[in-house]
Image: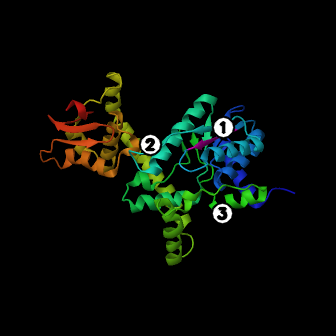
Amino acid sequence: MGPGAAVAEVRTAVRACLADLAAGQLVLVACSGGADSLALAAAAAFTAPRLDLRAGGVTVDHGLQAGSAERAAKVAARLAELGLAPVSSVAVTVPRDGPGPEAAARQARYGALDRAAREHGAAAILLGHTLDDQAETVLLGLARGSGGRSLAGMPARRGHYRRPLLAVRRAATAAACAELGLEPWQDPHNADDRFARARVRHQALPALEAALGPGVTEALARTAGQLRADAECLDDLAFAESGQLRQASEAGGGSDPAGLDVAWLAALPAAIRSRVLRDAAVMAGCPAGALSAAHIGQLDALVTAWRGQRWADLPGGVRARRQAGKVWFSSNTRN
């Protein structure tokens, strides 16, 4: 008897995601033990050898819940039982200050995954985000007034990260685990209304479905795909425009970027200008994930609505100021 329909759906998605990798390369599955990542791990263990690839696994212990170390060990053991090798269980420390708990945990997790990829020489890291996760991300971005970059949701690929299940519903991953006799871990944080994503999952999306009819989740995910195509086009145009910025930074050995000419910036379309300013801020040392639309708005005001304001303070201890017809970025400790 062949696999059930849900197992087949997940395996097909994973096969399509891995099809371009060269024989013998290693892919790592990031697995929390939940249904999404567990179904992904099982599918990778089945599919990778048939594509002449190697599949390993990594689970991250955030240390935020009682018994997390023991649970991470159980997840690692389950990954090994599925046939994944190598398997790593990595403990991280989530800082209590700085961004909120979700953002801090995410940063710590991705740092651990990056280190695991380097240690094992992995060509790709697979993440278990589903179509439902994508819809939640878009709705969260919309509620926060985020720009197009956020509303475009999560990319199917970015660097060595790949998300094979972005077109697969969460119900399918749960069904795949049931078909395979796998018992996923139910993270209590996913039902904790203190977290915005949990409220979106259990309150906002069901309310939208009730008010507008079925298909809202798929529509939000579809919107993300459409916006991502537009955002990537604008990113490419901005990348071409900011060539002089990168050249100046490289000529200076990667130090603070040279001043940006205000007249040049003002002549750019707003969507391109905001991206050029964001790239300049990141080059100057701003953490990309900490830059909000409000920060970019402050930078844009130095160009388009300057009334003598002295500077804009940005994340990462970076300060932008307008002087002599240019916008300059530097450490605010030097101002």
Tell me the crowding category of disc 2: few under 14, some 14 to 19, or many 20 or more residues within 10 angstroms, Cα based: few
Question: What span is in magenta?
Answer: 56-61
Nearer mark to the viewer, of 2 and 3:
2
> Three-letter amino acid code at disc 1?
Val
**Mark nearer the N terminus (3 vs 1):** 1
Q: Is residue 280 left or right of residue 32?
A: left
> Three-letter amino acid code at disc 3?
Ala
Identify whether 309 is placed above or below 284.
Answer: below
Local SS, label 1: strand
Q: Please identify the quadrant where the C terminus is shown.
A: top left
> Three-letter amino acid code at disc 2?
Pro
- Mark 3 and mark 1: Cα distance apart in space: 25 Å
Q: Residue 212, percent across and down?
A: 50, 76
Q: Residue furthest right?
A: 1
Q: Which residue is mark 3?
A: 171
Q: In this rendered view, identify the residue nearer to me: 155 or 88.
A: 88
Reply yes or no: does residue 200 show up in magenta: no
Q: Is residue 43 left or right of residue 247?
A: right
Local SS, label 2: loop
Nearer mark to the viewer, of 2 and 1:
2
Q: Which residue is mark 2?
A: 95
- Mark 2 and mark 3: Cα distance apart in space: 33 Å
Q: Which residue is mark 1?
A: 27
Reply yes or no: does residue 57 show up in magenta: yes
- Specify whether residue 269 is in view: no
Q: Is residue 70 left or right of residue 93?
A: right
The color scheme shown is: rainbow
Q: Please identify the quadrant where the N terminus is shown.
A: bottom right
